[in-house]
């Protein structure tokens, strides 16, 4: 630890950045009032997960080292599809209700 | 991973990515939040380079910085009367507490566990990824293309106006 902690970069450092980024995205996704803000939090969480996956792919011993990178390709694909549909939903909700405020989209509330 | 280059690069990228992500949280203007998000995506691409995954770094720049950011900007611009406010709901204290607890658990596990690591970088070149995608993972690869088509059609269907639907019904 101490001085060596700053000059040697290991798996822990990358995982820590991924964990902090995930926690930040989590807080944003849970607390933002604008639906597009919520989606930005989700995108940050997906990026943090990709970073963690690639970290394990780079640092862990494996029989198939390319598996982690391939999985990240699929995560990026699904994230792109998810973003397109979620933003289309936001635009659709806006057309019907003139707002994307998640506090005001409460048609199911009794 | 030693040497001045990777170490300085790591800390610079960590600061850039996390500060930009914090900017998404604290900026009051939704438009500024999107710009901070783009900076954060670029930082992640830098991490991918640091992890010897150049192809994924390029894909990150093209897909996240290029496509998804523009998509989010379009969504912001297509909802003009909804306001540009990027404020929090009443659950913010609980969400922040939960996120801090989550980060604490993650960091404890990360620094407590004895990770088995290798020193040499594995082969994750474009050729290796391409071979894997069209060999072992060809079925998931095809399913992903079907998913993308479905998402494309679904997104177009969702944003059609009633007038456009009426026109299509006549045709």
Image (cartoon, rainbow, N blue to C red):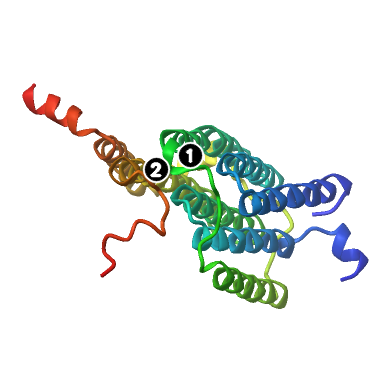
A101 on left or right of A25: left
Residue B7 percent location from the top left of the image: 83, 51
Residue at point 7%, 24% (across, down): B170
Q: Residues within 10 Å of mark 1 (few under 14, many from 20)?
A: many
**Which residue position is annotated with label 1?**
B72
Q: Nearer the viewer, residue A76 or B85?
A: B85
Locate the C terminus of chain B and report the quarter of the image it occupies.
Answer: top left
B138 on left or right of B119: left
**Location of residue B160 (image quadrant):** top left
Above or below: residue B77 compared with residue A66? above
The chain letter under disc 2 is A
Residue A41 percent location from the top left of the image: 53, 54
Q: Secondary structure at mark 1?
A: helix
Q: List the single residue furthest toward the left.
A: B170
Residue at point 59%, 61% (across, down): A22
**Which residue position is annotated with label 2?**
A87
Q: Are marks 2 and 1 in contact (CB under 8 Å)?
A: yes
Q: Residues within 10 Å of mark 2 (few under 14, many from 20)?
A: many
Q: Nearer the viewer, residue A46 or A98?
A: A98
Residue at point 76%, 61% (across, down): A10
Q: Secondary structure at mark 2?
A: helix
B163 on left or right of A53: left
Residue at point 60%, 72% (across, down): B102
B156 on left or right of A18: left
Q: List the single residue furthest toward the right.
A: A3
Locate the N terminus of chain B and report the quarter of the image it occupies.
Answer: bottom right
Q: Nearer the viewer, residue A104 or B105?
A: A104
């Amino acid at each position: 630890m101490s001085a060596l902690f700053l000059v040697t970069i290991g798996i822990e450092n990358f995982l820590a950045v991924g964990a902090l980024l995930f926690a930040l995205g989590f807080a944003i996704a849970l607390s933002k009032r604008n639906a597009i803000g919520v989606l930005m939090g989700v995108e940050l969480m997906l990026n943090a997960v990709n970073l963690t996956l690639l970290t394990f792919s780079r640092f862990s011993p494996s029989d198939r080292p390319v598996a982690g990178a391939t999985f990240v390709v699929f995560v990026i694909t699904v994230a792109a599809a998810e973003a397109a549909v979620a933003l289309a939903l936001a635009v659709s909700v806006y057309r019907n209700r003139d707002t994307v405020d998640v506090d005001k989209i409460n048609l199911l509330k009794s | 991973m030693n040497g001045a280059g990777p170490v300085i690069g790591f800390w610079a990228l960590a600061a850039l990515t996390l500060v930009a992500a914090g900017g998404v949280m604290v900026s009051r203007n939704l438009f500024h939040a999107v710009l901070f998000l783009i900076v954060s995506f670029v930082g992640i691409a830098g991490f991918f380079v640091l992890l010897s995954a150049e192809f994924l770094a390029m894909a990150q720049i093209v897909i996240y910085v290029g496509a998804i950011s523009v998509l989010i900007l379009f969504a912001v611009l297509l909802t003009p009367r909804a306001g540009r406010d990027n404020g929090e709901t009443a659950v913010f204290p609980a969400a922040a507490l939960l996120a801090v607890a989550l980060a604490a658990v993650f960091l404890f596990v990360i620094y407590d566990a004895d990770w088995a690591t290798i020193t040499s970088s594995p082969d994750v070149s474009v050729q290796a990824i391409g071979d894997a995608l069209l060999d072992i993972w060809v079925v998931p690869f095809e399913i992903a293309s079907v998913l993308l088509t479905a998402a494309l059609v679904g997104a177009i269907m969702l944003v059609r106006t009633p007038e456009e639907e009426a026109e299509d019904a006549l045709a």
